[in-house]
Amino acid sequence: MISKVLIFHLLACGVVGRTPPNPLARYRDVMTTQGIVRGYYAPHPPHYIYLGIPYARPPTRHDRFKAPKPTLPWSGIFEATHRVKCPQPDGSGDENCLVVNVFTPENATLLPVIVHFHDGVFQKGWGSFKVPLKLLERSFVFVSFNYRLGILGFLCLGTEAAPGNAGLKDQVAALYWVQRNIAKFGGNPLDVTVYGTGTGAASIEILLLSGSTTDLFQKAIIESGSVLSPTTIKHDPITDVINLATSLGIENAGVDTFEDIYQLPVKRLVNSSTIFLPCVEKELRLSHSIIDKDPRDVFRSKHYQHIPMMIVYTNAEEVTIITGDDERFQTIPEDFQGLLPHDLVFEDEDTKRKVAKLVKDFYFAELESTDSIIQSYVDFINDVFVGYPVVKSAANYASNGNPVYLMNFVYKANITRNKNVNIAGASPGDIFLYFTHNTFKEEYDEVVTERLVTLWTNFIKLG
């Protein structure tokens, strides 16, 4: 971990590494640990934007599935104007994607720092390029970043070449970059709040329970994601590798097919229906693990960093699947066993059958209209994937001594992403939209925005 002496040195020298803004070109140069980066001025509120600063080397070829390596220094000035994405399921993006984006108020000096972990079910998404205006107005330094996704981020073979959880190790590397550099941008490395939405929130929990990020952040905002969700950790990752290799036409697929997999073009790797998730890693001689035991065991042990936490939950993003044209969700299923969470363990098939009937009767008894059936599916999915796991996590943290603030957010404004879906409540990440919009159609949306910004501001500044 970074020493307190080094952090004090960074705080003391923060102003030294930052040049005054150029009055004509309206840019500002900052000396980072790798070299000089140049960001550009934007008004309303006055701030500087630095996009696409590398925090690790490009993870390509033999390093494709390994932990990230530190960036090499550069000479000259790095123009921080690059909108970078990691490879996406649609084939867009680039493997040279391990970058941070920094948004800092014009006269920032030792301001509280927010580091945002993006959502995307571990398969898609990127660090936001959009300025969180409402947060900058409240005098925060805001950082977003990319981490590897899908097979590139979460191939778990349990070998030195692909130990697993590369995407989580990217997140740790990004937090180290923040600790070493954010003072030069006007932020306080001793006052860092991590803010995750969806699987970004689950990632923060994983890092917190792993013990790998002690002293890298001091507060956490967890929104609509949980390490206890059935869709967070894969307990049988080798099956996914075999399925992917088979779909790619690799014969005799297994762990020993790794040589064939890592040489494939990135667009072939990401163009797959196989979902890759974080895994419990094997102990390896040359690789530091992030997850070495089930998170539920870590909760019971209480051996993790205890920090103030703000935990918020909205509707599950899975509602967008149900509210489409899929006829499967317009009728009540005869056999409900296949819809039970996959992480449930039953003594025998008879017990599983009884539990399935109890759950089915609870959600779907005496329903007649299609709308009520769809709403029951939405309720079931929200309870399984968001509501229960999030509240259970909050209860675990609170019982173990963490100061915890829990909120259920169901207000649906005109800015939500799924405007055509007539389901009550908001989806993961919708709260973040309140911080990026400057104007709203309805007056009450402004009222709710002000309340949210005040809640976030109070927690970030006061814990």
Image: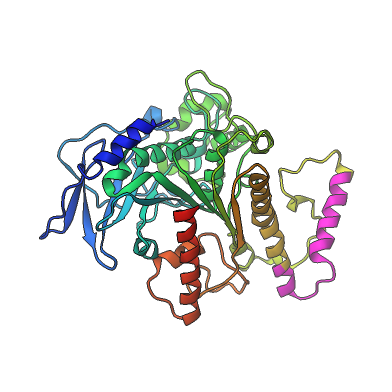
Q: Which residues are magenta?
A: 351-375
Please state which of residues 19 and 380 is positioned toward the viewer in this rendering.
19
Q: Principal SS element in the magenta part? A: helix
Q: Quadrant of residue 108?
A: bottom left
* Residue 109 spot, x, y in % from top left: 28, 51
Q: Is residue 131 above or below residue 154?
A: below
Q: Is residue 352 magenta?
A: yes
Which residue appears at 28% of the width and 68% of the height?
44
Which residue appears at 80% of the width and 74% of the height?
368
Which residue appears at 51% of the width and 73% of the height?
448
Does residue 328 appear in this view?
no
Q: Which residue in the rendered view is the most extreme toward the left? A: 24
Please state which of residues 407 and 171 is positioned toward the viewer in this rendering.
407
* Residue 117 spot, x, y in % from top left: 46, 49
Please state which of residues 413 and 88 is positioned toward the viewer in this rendering.
413
Q: Is residue 231 left or right of residue 350?
A: left
* Residue 324 spot, x, y in % from top left: 61, 67
Q: Is residue 424 magenta?
A: no
Q: Is residue 394 left or right of residue 285?
A: right
Q: Is residue 181 left or right of residue 227?
A: left
Q: Quadrant of the N terminus?
A: top left
* Residue 7 spot, x, y in % from top left: 34, 36
Which residue appears at 46% of the width and 62% of the height?
432
Please state which of residues 446 and 360 is positioned toward the viewer in this rendering.
446
Does residue 4 appear in this view?
yes
Q: Is residue 72 left or right of residue 27?
A: right
Q: Which residue in the rendered view is the most extreme toward the top? A: 285
Number of marks in the rendered image: 0
Q: Is residue 413 above or below residue 63?
A: below
Q: Quadrant of residue 69?
A: top left
Q: Is residue 12 above or below residue 62?
A: below
